[in-house]
Image (tube, grey):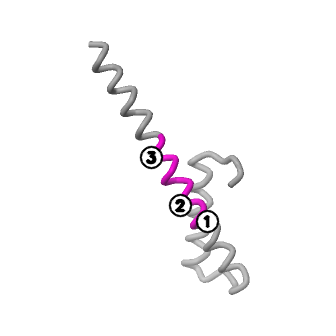
Amino acid sequence: METIKYSQAVEQLEQIIAKLEDNKMDVDELGLQVKRAAELVAFCKATLRETEKEVEEILRSMEEGE
């Protein structure tokens, strides 16, 4: 996946969902957009997990420093 920010990934997901909800996607585009949505969801999950780890490490180091 190209380098994007979390907020950009969420925005793209929201756009895909809006098109799906409005039935504004033809069958040819549907497969591509579902695949893209899956990639974006995986990216967002990985980003959240990594951020959670970083926050936990920071909090742990702060507690150790007390």
- The numbered mark, 3 or 2, whose residue comes first in the sequence reads 2
- SS state under label 3: helix
Image quarter where the C terminus lies is: top left
Residue at the image position 58 percent from the left and 79 percent from the top: 22
The kind of residue on which mark 3 rests is Arg
Task: Work out how far the residue at label 1 is from the one at label 3, CA to CA, in angstroms.
Answer: 24 Å
**In the image, is residue 37 part of the stretch drawn in magenta?**
no
The kind of residue on which mark 2 rests is Val
> For the residue carrying disc 2, how many other residues have a C-alpha within 10 Å: few (<14), some (14-19), or many (20+)?
some
Residue 49 tag number: 3
- The numbered mark, 1 or 2, whose residue comes first in the sequence reads 1
Please tell me which residue lies in front, 57 or 9.
57
Q: Residue furthest top?
A: 66
Residue 15 tag number: 1
Q: Residue 15 at x, y = what percent?
A: 61, 65
Q: Residue 43 at x, y = what percent?
A: 56, 54
Q: Which residues are magenta?
A: 38-50
Please tell me which residue lies in front, 58 or 30.
58
Please tell me which residue lies in front, 19 or 40.
40
- Disc nearest the viewer among 3 and 2: 3
- Disc nearest the viewer among 1 and 3: 3
Indicate the quadrant where residue 29 lies: bottom right
**In the image, is residue 44 part of the stretch drawn in magenta?**
yes
> For the residue carrying disc 3, how many other residues have a C-alpha within 10 Å: few (<14), some (14-19), or many (20+)?
few
Indicate the quadrant where residue 42 lies: bottom right
| Image marks 1 and 2: residues in contact by CB distance under 8 Å | no
Residue at the image position 33 percent from the left and 19 percent from the top: 62
Residue 41 tag number: 2
- The numbered mark, 1 or 3, whose residue comes first in the sequence reads 1
